[in-house]
Image (tube, grey):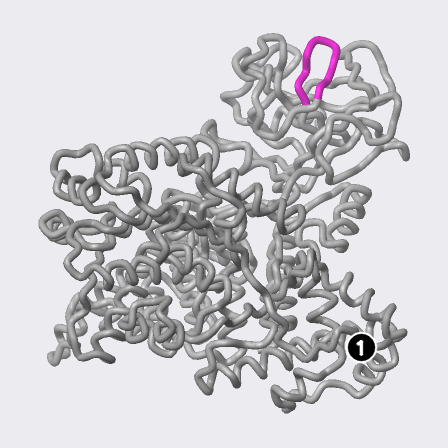
């Protein structure tokens, strides 16, 4: 898979989706929006980041033979090699000293505390109770680590032929009561939990056996992902640690791990800062010597001098041979330049990772040093990274754990916002996508106002609060209830927006009362009707005094849209009537992007079992919401695909109520076990037919419900997308029968 090609397809899919909702009637606003989107306003250029290699210190077996680790550790971590920072941390842990490990993703941080804990337990075979508590910020990490512990157990039993002498278990809110009861009856040596459950373990009566096992036997207290414990949560965790240490019979080794804690300053200053944070959190003194940083190593050949411009030029002009092997990659001039110019830098005689860089920045640097055009360097860089991917895939296929200069792209996608303009209606109008209060770089401080757009016509509605004879900016959906003098509403500018003499007749009769002069708004609805308003660029306004410009003020919430003749129900939200720059929220953006990624993995030839995607959210509630959003999207898309396919295959591309269910059922082609609540397919035809007819009836209901006027603004139905039309049987003949009318 070519990661750059896949990335561009994913971003293009998202662009297409977002642009499909852009309906802006004002040509000047539309021009600015298109220009900003073209520059990547919502999807900026991706960042390229490399994962450098870590310096290897030796195999677990050799370290066990040297006496650093218990001999049986070699059977648990069979075939493992340890990085230098892992060895440094384990030396501290096995010596009974506290430590903090700050190293990158995939650097084996967990092995530092697991190795220290296992060494202690194997060296003290008669130890009982909870010897180590390992605290994770998320249950997903606990589940993952439990699987790792299980693999270590299998390794040991397979290599030694003996039962694993160390017990371990997880205790969170996700286990059933039976599993929890086993933990309560037989507390394990190593307990995996989260800080909230640990708090409960120390206070609830029914968990007193675990609590006592911790207080009597604890030797290791570990907090993974230390950077997550900050603010109020950090304070709670710090107090929890102090309570545990105060009650325990033994002095425990305190261990913390984190990939990101301090990212600025020199190596020594970072250590100092991490030591201070650890001292505050754990309530005991940490020195910089107890902070273990990652030790990086080069994976390619480097002899102290970067390749010359001539060498880079020759290599780029020669091109990339994707069939080249590892040895060729290690001596390639541009690959060496990439590792030392982009991935790594030296700081205080240490190799440290560079910050991620934009592709264009890397291309510009390569162009300047090679003297070749940027377009040539960009293409070569893409080919080189593809070669690196191919070589690493070969290494993985032969069972190698360590790859060469792996990389990743970071793509940030911004949520669609508002368009902001001044109130000018001439060439002096200022239009921007950047939020603010005033027009930038102007001494007169002309205010800027958010603009939203009619979903029916694309007409701009300027969000304002009317306070006496002034208009002030108001964010969309922001009310003025707290200010009794303010009236939240919209300013609509245009010659033919509203003509009371003609347009009142088009409104519902219940909104009007008839007078001698004709229909007028009734008293309950009057304030929601358009009011002619004069205004200037500074927000001064009047209903009677002519000013620079004029428009129509409508109080929020909108009763109707005069630009499109659309009427709204009382409960209809403003977001259904009007839209900001785009309609996609975070959940929709995540779903659309995920859908595109999975499609691209399929296009790249990955089998279904390998088409996987991880989506992270910051809490369980958002995760549940996103999961529901995924499922709803998938069900709606499959149903609509079935309806569309059924129409394509139907005679004259037409279906009616009687044939719809069966046609959609056949188009979906679902295996029986996917919809039948049985473990095997029925033998009797009539039984199978009953199931199929039941599903067909359900599909009719779902199809009709989906073809109603859709409430899903971000997922319009097939009729709204002009992929089908709905007609009424014999309507023309009935309408033509004048005797009945």
Q: Nearer the viewer, residue 463 or 741?
A: 463
Residue 694: quarter of image: bottom left
Residue 741 is one of the magenta-drawn residues:
no
Residue 198: quarter of image: top left
List x then y, in percent, for residue 192: 28, 52
List x then y, in percent, for residue 41: 71, 49
Figure check: 505 above or below 58:
above
Report the magenta residues as a range. Answer: 464-472
Residue at the spot 53% in from the left edge and 81% down from the top edge:
393
List x then y, in percent, for residue 447: 78, 24
Q: As drawn, is 3 to the left or to the right of 637?
A: right
Q: Residue 729: in sight, yes or no?
A: no
Residue at the spot 70% in from the left edge and 29% down from the top edge:
462
Q: As drawn, is 376 to the left or to the right of 509?
A: right
Q: As drawn, is 333 to the left or to the right of 587?
A: right
List the residue tagged with mark 1: 307
Residue at the spot 50% in from the left edge and 32% down from the top edge:
573
Residue that sits furthest to the front in the current view: 66
Say which quadrant the C terminus sits in.
top left
Q: Nearer the viewer, residue 612 or 121?
A: 121
Residue 467 is one of the magenta-drawn residues:
yes
Q: Secondary structure at mark 1?
A: loop
Could you classify mark 1 by the number of other residues whose Cα lies within 10 Å: few (under 14), some (14-19), or many (20 or more)?
some
Figure check: 52 above or below 558:
below
Residue at the spot 66% in from the left edge and 35% down from the top edge:
452
List x then y, in percent, for residue 90: 40, 60
Q: Nearer the viewer, residue 359 or 88?
A: 88
Say which quadrant the N terminus sits in.
bottom right
Figure check: 351 above or below 36:
below
Q: Residue 614: in sight, yes or no?
A: yes
Q: Tell me which secondary structure the magenta stretch mostly adopts.
A: strand
Q: Nearer the viewer, residue 181 or 96?
A: 96
């Amino acid at each position: 898979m070519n990661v750059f090609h896949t990335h561009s397809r994913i971003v293009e899919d998202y662009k297409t989706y977002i642009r499909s909702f852009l309906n802006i009637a004002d040509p000047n606003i539309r021009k600015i929006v298109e220009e900003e989107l073209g520059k990547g306003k919502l999807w900026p250029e991706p960042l390229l980041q490399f994962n450098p290699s870590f310096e290897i210190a030796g195999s677990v077996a050799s370290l066990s033979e040297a006496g650093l680790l218990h001999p049986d550790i070699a059977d648990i971590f069979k075939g493992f090699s340890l990085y230098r920072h892992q060895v440094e941390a384990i030396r501290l842990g096995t010596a009974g000293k506290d430590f903090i490990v700050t190293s990158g993703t995939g650097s084996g941080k967990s092995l530092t505390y697991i190795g220290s804990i296992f060494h202690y337990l194997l060296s003290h075979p008669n130890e009982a109770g909870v010897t180590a508590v390992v605290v994770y910020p998320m249950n997903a990490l606990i589940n993952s680590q439990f699987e790792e512990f299980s693999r270590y157990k299998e390794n040991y039993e397979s290599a030694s032929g003996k039962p694993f002498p160390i017990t371990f278990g997880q205790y969170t809110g996700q286990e059933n009561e039976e599993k929890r009861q086993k933990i309560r009856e037989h507390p394990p040596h190593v307990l995996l939990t989260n800080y909230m459950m640990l708090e409960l373990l120390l206070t609830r009566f029914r968990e007193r056996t675990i609590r006592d096992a911790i207080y009597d036997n604890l030797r290791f207290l570990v907090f993974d992902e230390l950077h997550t414990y900050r603010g109020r949560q950090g304070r709670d965790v710090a107090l929890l640690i102090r309570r545990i240490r105060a009650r325990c019979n033994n002095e425990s080794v305190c261990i913390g791990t984190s990939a990101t804690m301090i990212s600025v300053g020199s190596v020594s200053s970072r250590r100092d800062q991490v030591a201070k944070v650890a001292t505050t959190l754990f309530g005991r003194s940490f020195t910089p010597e107890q902070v273990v940083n990652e030790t990086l190593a080069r994976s390619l050949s480097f002899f102290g001098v970067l390749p010359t411009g001539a060498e880079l030029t020759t290599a780029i002009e020669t091109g990339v041979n994707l069939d080249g092997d590892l040895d060729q990659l290690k001596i390639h001039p541009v690959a060496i330049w990439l590792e030392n110019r982009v991935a790594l830098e030296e700081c205080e005689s240490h190799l440290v990772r560079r910050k991620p860089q934009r592709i264009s920045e890397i291309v510009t640097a390569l162009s300047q040093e090679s003297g070749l055009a940027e377009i040539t360097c960009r293409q070569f860089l893409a080919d080189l990274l593809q070669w690196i991917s191919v070589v690493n895939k070969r290494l993985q296929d032969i069972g190698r754990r360590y790859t060469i200069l792996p990389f990743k792209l970071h793509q940030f996608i911004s949520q669609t916002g508002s368009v902001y303009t001044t109130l000018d209606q001439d060439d002096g109008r200022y239009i921007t996508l950047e939020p603010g209060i005033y027009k930038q770089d102007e001494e007169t401080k002309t205010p800027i106002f958010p603009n939203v757009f009619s979903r029916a016509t694309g007409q701009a509605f300027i969000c304002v609060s009317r306070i006496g004879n002034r208009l002030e900016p108001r964010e969309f959906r922001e009310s003025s209830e707290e200010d009794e003098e303010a009236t939240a509403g919209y300013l609509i500018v245009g010659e033919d927006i509203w003509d009371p003499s003609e347009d009142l007749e088009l409104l519902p009769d219940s909104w009007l009362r008839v007078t001698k002069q004709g229909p007028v708004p009734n008293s309950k609805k009057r304030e929601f009707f358009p009011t002619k308003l004069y205004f200037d660029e500074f927000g001064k306004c009047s209903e009677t005094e002519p000013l620079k410009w004029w428009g129509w003020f409508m109080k929020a919430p909108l009763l109707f849209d005069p630009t499109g003749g659309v009427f709204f129900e009382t409960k209809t939200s403003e977001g259904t009537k009007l839209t900001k720059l785009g309609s996609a929220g975070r959940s929709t953006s995540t779903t659309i992007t995920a859908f595109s990624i999975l499609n691209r993995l399929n296009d790249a030839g990955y089998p279904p079992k390998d088409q996987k995607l991880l989506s992270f959210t910051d809490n369980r509630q958002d995760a549940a919401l996103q999961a529901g959003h995924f499922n709803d999207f998938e069900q709606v898309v499959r149903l609509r695909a079935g309806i569309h396919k059924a129409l394509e295959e139907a005679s004259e591309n037409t279906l009616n109520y009687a044939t719809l269910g069966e046609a959609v059922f056949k188009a979906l082609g679902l295996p029986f076990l996917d919809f039948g609540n049985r473990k095997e397919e029925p033998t009797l035809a009539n039984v199978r037919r009953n199931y199929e007819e039941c599903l067909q009836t359900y599909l009719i209901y779902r199809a009709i419900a989906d073809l109603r006027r859709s409430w899903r603004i971000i997922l319009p139905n097939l009729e709204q997308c002009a992929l089908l039309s709905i007609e009424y049987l014999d309507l023309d003949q009935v309408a033509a029968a004048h005797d009945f009318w």
